[in-house]
Amino acid sequence: KFPPVLMIYFIVSLFIAGIFTLMGFTNREGYYCSSQNLLDAYITSTMFCTSIGAILTYLLLQAPLFGLMHMLAVSWTIFYPFTKKRFDNAGKTKYLHISAVLIVLLAPTIPVILAFATDGFVITKSLPFTCLVKNLDVFYYTFLLPISIACATELTLLLLLVRKLISHDGSIGIAERKL
């Protein structure tokens, strides 16, 4: 069904990101460092570092967006049950599912393209060794800020849902019985 399947996508996205993060513990010779000189290695990253950085950036941006789409779908179900029922009866829910998945699959490509257009990716200095966006301003605006906005929106919707459920007195109206 539509809303719960987004959480499955969320979990799969984080699982794949975890696999790529675990690859950082391998730290094989030549995977991350392109030179013995620290400054040269910082300026030019290896192809492995660039690809791991792009994949991790994409997947770690994709996961909160799946969570946000799930929370939007659940909020829509709770706040507008009649509209949800009409969409279900008309078979239009699949279009919402397709559009939500397309938005989540395409939106994280923009920060990855911006990272490539600016300075690319660089290896972090702590374990697990992984590659992130080199320019800190680009990293903030294309990685941390979208994740923070998605998580804040999810939290706000969750609090609104909890408030709605707590304020519900338990009685079922005539219109709700028809559902």
Image (spheres, grey):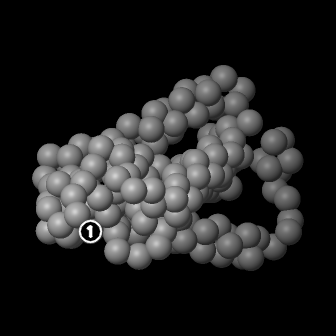
Does the rendering let one see residue 166?
yes
List x then y, in percent, for residue 24: 48, 60
List x then y, in percent, for residue 78: 68, 55
Count of numbered labels shown in the rendering: 1
User: Against 117, is 93 above or below?
Assistant: above
Q: Nearer the viewer, residue 140 or 120?
A: 120
Name the amino acid, label 1: Tyr
User: Against 105, is 134 above or below?
Assistant: below
Q: Residue at x 51, y 36 (%)?
A: 101
Q: Residue at x 46, y 42 (%)?
A: 104
List x then y, in percent, for residue 113: 24, 43
Q: Nearer the viewer, residue 107 or 33?
A: 33
Dot 1 crowding, Cα within 10 Å, few <14, some 14–19, many 20+: few
Q: Which residue is mark 1?
A: 140
Q: Is residue 68 toward the left or the right of residue 166 in the image?
A: left
Q: Quadrant of the N terminus?
A: top right
Q: Quadrant of the C terminus?
A: top right
Q: Residue at x 63, y 46 (%)?
A: 12
Q: Residue at x 58, y 52 (%)?
A: 19
User: Against 126, is 25 above or below?
Assistant: above
Q: Nearer the viewer, residue 93 or 104?
A: 104
Q: Is residue 135 toward the left or the right of residue 5 in the image?
A: left
List x then y, in percent, for residue 37: 18, 67
**Image quadrant assignment for residue 85:** top right
Q: Residue furthest top?
A: 90
User: Against 67, is 91 above or below?
Assistant: above
Element class at badge 1: helix
Does the rendering let one see residue 64?
no
**Image quadrant assignment for residue 126:** bottom left
Q: Is residue 23 toward the left or the right of residue 142 in the image?
A: right
